[in-house]
Amino acid sequence: MTLTKTILATTALTFAAGFATAQEMSNDMTLVSWGGAYQKSQDLAYLKPYLEMHPEVSATWDSSSNEAVAKLRAMNEAGNVTWDVVDVVASDAIRLCDEGLAMEIDPDTMLAAAPDGTSAAEDFGDLLVSDCFIPQIVYSTTVGYRTDLVGDTPPDDICDIFDLEAYPGKRSLEKRPINTMEWALLCDGVAKDEVYDVLGTSEGQERALAKLDTIKDQVVWWSAGADTPQLLADGEVVMGSTYNGRLFSVIEEQKQPVAMLWDAQVFDLDGWIIPAGLPEDRLARALDFIMFATDTQRLADQAKYISYGPARASSAPLVGKHAELGIEMGPHMPTDPANAKNTFLYNYEFWADYRDDIDAKFQAWLAK
Amino acid sequence: MAALTPISRTPVSFYLPVTAAAGAFAGLLVGTSQGAPWAGVLYGAGLMALISLILTRVLPSEKAGRWTLVALFLIGGYAMAGFPGAVVGGLFGWFFGWFTFWLYEGRYRARLAPYLTPFQVLWHFSFRVICGAIFVFLITPILVVMPLSFNAENFFTFTPEMLRFDPAGYSLKHYRDFLTNSVWQDALRNSVMIAPAATFLSVSFGTLAAIGLSQPHVPFRRAIMAMLISPMIVPLIISAAGMYFFYSRIGLQGTYLGVVLAHAALGIPFVIITVTATLVGFDRSLTRAAANMGANPVTTFFRVQMPLIMPGVISGALFAFITSFDEVVVVLFVGSAGQKTLPWQMFTGLREQISPTILAVATILVAISIVLLTVVELLRRRSERLRGMSPG
C-alpha cells in the first residue's frame, strides 16, 4: 500500500514539476556535431562560456553529424526527436529544410545583431543559404602535399593532382563526386564560370570522369576527414584533398612535413539547425543557446582553436591568435585575401538538383 | 620426445628444391617490401639453393656454417633497412641455417612413426604450416596495433624513430589521454555499467530458457528455440532498427534500461546455446533423486543442476559480456549520447580523428580479454580437477 502511495505521489509531483516548467527552459540539451578538433573548438568557444552563464544546464555532445540527415528522419518517424541543436553542412541543412525536418529561422529576431547594430541577416549576408540554416564557419576543401616527396618544385596549381609525370605517386581524393568532378573539369580546360553548365550535361559528366580516369589507378579514395592527414603522415600519398582545418592541424600542431596549396579551394559552410517540432521548453533553450553561440564574439573565438573562418562579417576583425600555439590565425583562414586568390564557388542549387544522378554515375565509375 | 625413426642424410635432389622453395617465399616477402616481388622470388630461390649447397658440401662443421649464415644475414639486413632490417635478417639467417640442416640430416623424420609414407610426412608438416599461417593471419593485426599504441605521434604510423627503437619515438601519452580524457572515461563507465547488467539478464533468462527447452514435454520446442536464438542470426542492423522504433514508442530509447535490454536480447542466444550443450551431458536421474530425497525444484536447481552445468553458464556469460562490451550497431540506435559506450566512442573516434588513443584502448581491452579468458580457463580446470573429471 505504502509503496503504491509513494509511487503515486512521486508521479504527481513529477507531473506538477513538468507543468510548472513547461513555459520555461529545459535544462538538458543535446548538441550534435562532428567530433574531433572541430567539436572541441565549439565546446571551448560556445558551450563552456554558455554553461558558465547557466550552471543549471547540463549539455551532452553527440558526434553524429555525419549521419544527421538519416537519424533526424528516423527520429521524426519514431516521433522521438532527442537532439536540440544540430551542426550540419549547408547542403544537409537545405535538404533537412526541404523535408520539413529543420525549423525555419528568422535571423532578425532569433539571432544577435552585430555590435555596431548591423542586423544579423546583413551580417551573415549571402551565407544564409537556407531558411533553416544558421551559419557558423566557412571552411574549404583543398589539397595538402608532402614537402619531402614532391621534389624541388612543389605543386602550386590544383591541376598538379592530375600531373602524374611531375608528381608521381598516390594521391587521395574524396569518395564522392562533389569537388572532385569540378576539379577534374577545371583541369580539363573548362572555364571556372562554366563548370556547372558543363557538369549539368551528361557529356560533361563523362568528360570529368574521363579526366579522372587518367589518374584513377593512383587514387586512394577517402571518406572521413581524418583519412588524408593520416595518409600524408604515413607518406602513403604524395598529395591529397581534405578540409583546410585538418591540414592546419597536420602542419602546425602535429609538425608533419606537409604543406598546402590554396589554389581552387572550394568554400563550403557549416552551421546549426534546430530540429522541427521540439517541445516548447527545449526549443526555448535551443534558441537561447543559438542566440549566444552565433554572436559576433563567439564566432571569432572559435577561430582561436581551429582554422575555419567565422561566418559573420563583423567577426573577421576580431580573429586573434591560436589559443595554444600563439600563432596569428588570420593568415590560416580560408577567407584570408592571400589564400583566397583563386577560389571556387560551390553551387548548392546545382548539387541539390543533380546529386543523386551524378552520385550514381560516380559510384558506377568507381566500381568499374 | 624421443626419436622414433633412425635418420640418415638426404640427397641433394631432395633438400635443394625444398630450401629453394622456402627461399623463394622469403624472397617474395622481402621483394614485396622493396617493391619488386618477382625479382625477390628469383633471387630468394637462387640464393637459398646456393647457401644450402655451400653449407652442406663446402663448410666442414654445421655449427660454424650456421653462425656464419646468421652473421651474413644480419649484415645484409642492416645494409638493406638499418637496425630493424638486421633483426629480421638475423632471424632469417637463423631459420635458414636450421632449416637446411633439418632437411639435410633428415632430422625432420626422427620424431615421426617409421611406417609413414612420404606423403603422410609431407601432410604432417603442411598441416602444421597451414595452422601456423592461419594463426599468424588472425593474430598479426592485433600485434601490429600494440606497438603503434605507444606512438609518440598522433597518427597510426610507424615513425622512423620507432623503427630505430629510439625511446623518443615512444610515449604513453595515448594511455594518459584515455585515462584522463572525460569523453573516454564516460564511455568506459557506461560500458562497465551496461555490460554486467546485460550479462546478468542474459544469463538468468538464457539459462532458464535452456533448462525449460531441454525438457522433452515442452510443446513447440524447436520453434521457440529458433525464435530465441534469432537475434544471433538476423542481421544486427535489422534488429537495431526494429528496436529503435519500438523502444522510441515505449520511451526506452536513449535510456540505460533500453540499452541493457537490447544487449541482453543479443546475449541470450549465446547462453542458450552453451547451456543447452552442457545439458546434453546432464544426467536427469540426479534431479529425480534430489526430488525423491525431499528437495523442492528450486533447491534441486541451485544445489544439483546449477553446479553441474556451471561451465556452460560461465562460457555463455562470457560471450554475453563480450557481445555487450563490443557491440556498436545496436547501441548507436538504441542509445543516445548519454549512453555512449567504449565501442561507440572508438567508432566515432576512428571516423573523425584517427588518434592512437583508440589503439591504446584496444590494447587495454585485448589485455583484459586475455586475462579474463585465462582466469576462466584456470578456474574451469581447477573445478574439473577438484571433481576428479580430468587427471589435471
Image (spheres, coloured by chain):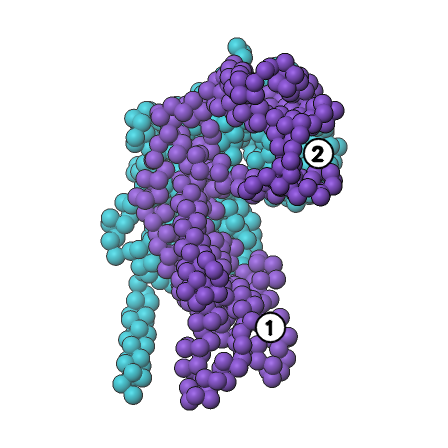
Residue B235 disc label: none
Residue A16: image x %, image y %? 29, 74
Residue sitting at x 45%, y 63% = B384
Q: What residue type is labelled 1?
A: Met
Chain A colour is cyan
Residue sitting at x 43%, y 71% = B307
Which residue has dot 1 on it?
A: B225
Corner quadrant of residue A335:
top left
Q: Vertically, is A242 above or below A339?
A: below
Which of the pair A139/B149 is nearer the observer? Answer: B149
Q: In which quarter of the image is the N terminus of chain A?
A: bottom left
Dot 1: what SS?
helix
Tag in front: 1 or 2? 1
Chain B colour is purple
Q: Circle 2: is it few (<14), some (14-19), or many (20+) Cα within 10 Å?
A: many
Spatial CA distance of label 1 from label 2 is 54 Å
Q: Which amino acid does label 2 sit on?
A: Gln
Which of the pair A170/B377 is nearer the observer? Answer: B377
Q: Circle 1: is it few (<14), some (14-19), or many (20+) Cα within 10 Å?
A: some
Residue A205 disc label: 2
